[in-house]
Image (cartoon, rainbow, N blue to C red):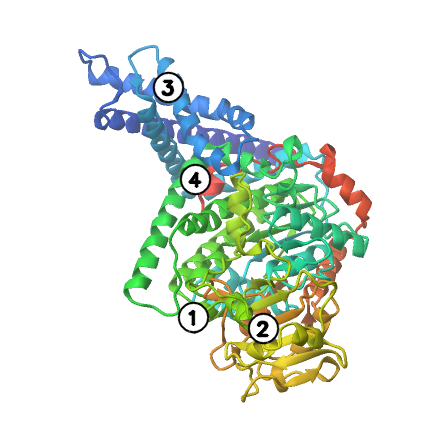
Amino acid sequence: MAGLGRNGRGERQAAVGRWRTTGSALLRVIVVWVVSTLTMMLLAGILPDFKLTSDNGESITRVALTAAWGAGAFGLLSALVWPLVVRAFLLVPALVLGLLVFFLNGSLLLVALRLIPTGHGAAEPETAVIVAAVMSAVASATSTSLAVRDDDAYRRRLSRLADRRRRRRGLDSAPQPPGLVLIQLDGVGERTLRHAVDSGLMPTVAAWLQGTHRLTPWRTDWSSQTGASQLGILHGSNFDVPAFRWYEKESGEVMVSNRPASAVELQRRAVERTGDGGLLTVDGASRGNLFSGGAEEVALVLTAAARRGRRNRSRAGYFAYFSDPANAVRTAGSFVAEVGRELAQSTRARLRREAPRIKRGGLYPFIRAFATVVERDVVVAAVMGDLLAGRTAVYADLVAYDEVAHHSGPRSRDTDQVLRRLDRSLALIAGAAGQAPRPYRIVLLSDHGQSPGETFESAFGLTLKDLVRAGCGLPVPRRARRTRSGAEARYAVRVALHRPVEEGEERPPQRESDPVVLASGNLGLVSFPDAEGRLTREQIDRRHPALLTTLANHPGIGFLLVRSEEHGAVLLGGGGGGGGGGGGTEVPLAQLADGEGPLKGFGRGAADAVRRTDTFPHTADIMVNSMYDPATGRVHAFEEQIGSHGGLGGEQSHPFLLSPVELSAPVPDSGELVGAEQVHHVLRRWLGEGQGPQIPVGAEALTTAEDSPRTAQPEGSFPVVDRVVQDKTC
C-alpha cells in the first residue's frame, strides 16, 4: 500500500509538472502576443504609410483589437508558412537568401493584414518590410528574455529538440557512446589563446583549462596555413601542398587552397594517397570547412561549393538558420553593427596613426562582417543541431579571428573583441552538448597561429614580384601593385554570392618567359613556366645571373630554397637572416640544422620542415621566406596583411590542441606533436576510443559519394535551433 501511495503521489506530481509546463508555455505565448500587438500599434502611430484604422478614425479599443488580429496572424504565418517559403528559395545564393528574408517577411505581413476581420490594415510594401523586421526582432527578444528567466524552460526545449532528432534518426534511448566535437578556431595560436585566457577574454576556455581539459601545443609544416593544416587534419595527408597558392607547370594552373576547384582536387589527391575517405566518414558532419573530411552532412564546405545544379547542397546549411525569420533579423542587425564597428575601428587606427597599418576600405568591412557574424551564427547553429541529432563526429571551423587579425594585427583590441564573442559561441555549443542524446567530448584546436609585422611592400617600397622582376632584368611598374590578401573569408563570400573567383595575382603570366611570383603570407614562390621541372641554382644563374644575388642580399629576405646540381638542394641565407652579416650563405639541405646558419632564430623543427617541402613535386623553383626577428616576433608578409601566416617565423607555426583529460594524451610526456598529419592520427585515435575503429572509405567510394544525390546534404540537415537557444549568446 505504501508503494501504491508513493506511485500515486509521483503521478500527481508529474501531472502537476505537466500542467505547470503547459501553463508556462501558454503564458509566454500570450506575453509575446501582447508585446507584438503593442509594437504594431506603436509602428502604426510612427510610420505614415502603415495604418490600422480607416480614414475617419476609430476607438483605441478597435485599434487594439485590429493590432491583436494582425500580430496573431503574422505570428501564425511566420510559424507555419515561413519554413516552406524559405525552402522554396533554397537554391538562390546564400547571402541573397539572407537579404530576401526581409522581403518575404514583409510579404507575410501584408497577407496578415488582409486576414484581419475586424478592422482596416494597410501598408506600403517598403513599409511592410520595416514593420515585419521590427516585429520579428521584438518577438524574438521577448521570447528570449522570458526563457532566460526560466532556465528550466530553456533546458526542456533543448531536451525536446534532442528527443525529436533522436527519434528521426532512429536512435533508441539506450546509452550511446561518446561523440567527438572538434571546433577549430582559425588562426588562434597557442600564445594567443593563453593570453586570451589570462586576460579574462575567454572564461569558458579558462574553466575548461582549470579542470576538464589539457592544452597541448603543436607545430605546423613550413606551409602554416589553413589549406595545408586542415587537409592534413581531416584527410591525413597534406603532401605536395607547398603553400596557400602555387603554380603547377604541367597544367599551367595556379592552385589556390580556398578556391573550390582547387580544394576538390586537393581532397581527391589526399584521399588517393591515403586510401581513406577522411576523419568524418562514419556519421560525421563538416561545417564551415575547406574540405569535407569524408562527411555526408556538410554546410558551408568549400569542396561542396564546387558542385553545380541541384547537387550543390553547400547552401542547404543556410536553410535551417534562415527558416526562422528572427534569426535573419538578428543576424542582419549584428551584420550592420559589425560593419559600423569596423569603420569606427579603422578610422580610429588611421587617426592615431597606428603602425603597422594597412588599408581596410572597399568591401572589407562587409567581408569581415560575413566572417564574424553570418558564418559564425550559421556554423554554431549547425553544430548545435548536430549535437541534438546525436552525430558521432563533428568538425567545424570558426574563421572570425583569422580574418580580423590579418587586417588589425594578432594582438589588438579588435581581435580581443572577436575572441570574447567566440568564447560565448563555445559556451553555447557546450550548453547544447549537455542536452544532447549522447555524451560529447569537446576538443578545441587551431590550424596555425599568426605572426605580426609590417608588409614587405610597406617596409621596402616594392612587392616581392617587383624585386624578382628587377633581378631578372625585366621592367618594373613605376607604381607597385599590391598583392591581394588571400584571407579565407573573401573567397567564402564570393562563393556564397555565386560570383566567379577573381584571379588577380593568381593569373598565369601572358608570356611564358615571365616568372610567376605568388605570395602566401611571408612565404613567396617563384616559378619559371617555360621550364620543365624545378630549375637548379646553376640553371637560374645562367638565365638570370643577378636574380638569386638580388634576393639573397635583400634585408627583407630570411632565406631561399633552391635545387643544386652539386648538393641536391641548398638553403641560401638572406640579407635579413638571423645569422647576422650579408646574404648568400649556402648550406646543403643534408647539413641543415635548427638554429644555425640561415635558420638561426627560426626555432625548433625548421630544418625538418624545409627538408620535407623540398620533396614535394610542386615545390617552386625558388622558395622565399621573409626575414624573422625573434626578439619582436615580426615578419614581413608578401601580401597585404599585418597579421600573417604561411611560412616560418614566430607564432604562425605554433597552434594548439585543447582536449578533455579523459582522452588519452596526444603525445608522450617527452614527445612533441609535429605536423597536421600527426594531429589527424591523434584525432582518429580519440574517435576509436569512443566508437571503436573507424571504417576507411576508399578514393573511389568517396568520389562516388560526393557526386551522388544520395549523399548530398538533405535540406535543413541540422534542426532549426529555436529562438531561445539561438538568442542565448549568438
SS for callout 1: loop
Three-letter residue code for mark 3: Leu
N-terminal of the pair, mark 4 or mark 3, is 3
Q: Which residue is nearer to you in this view: 109 or 1?
A: 109
Rounded to the nearest angstrom, the CA distance separating label 3 from label 1 is 59 Å
Measured in 3D between alpha carbons, the distance from the residue under mark 4 to the one under mark 3, in whole angstroms, is 29 Å
* Quadrant of residue 526 within the rendered picture: bottom right
In 3D space, how far apart are the residues under numbered discs 4 and 2 (Cα atoms)?
Answer: 54 Å
Circle nearer the viewer, 4 or 2: 2
Q: Going 55% across and 58% down the picture, which residue do you hit? A: 186
Residue position for label 3: 110
Which residue does the numbered mark 1 point to in the structure image?
461
Q: Residue at x 82, y 48 (%)?
A: 698
Q: CA distance from mark 4 to mark 1?
A: 57 Å
Question: Which mark, residue 147?
Answer: 4
Q: Mark 2 or mark 3: which is in front?
A: 2
Q: Choose top left, top right, bottom left or bottom right for residue 662.
A: bottom right
The quarter of the picture where the N terminus appears is top right
Q: Nearer the N terminus, badge 4 or badge 2?
A: 4
**How far apart in space, not on screen, are marks 2 and 1 (Cα)?**
18 Å
Above or below — where is 284 with respect to 573?
Answer: above
Q: Name the kind of residue labelled 2 in the image.
A: Asn
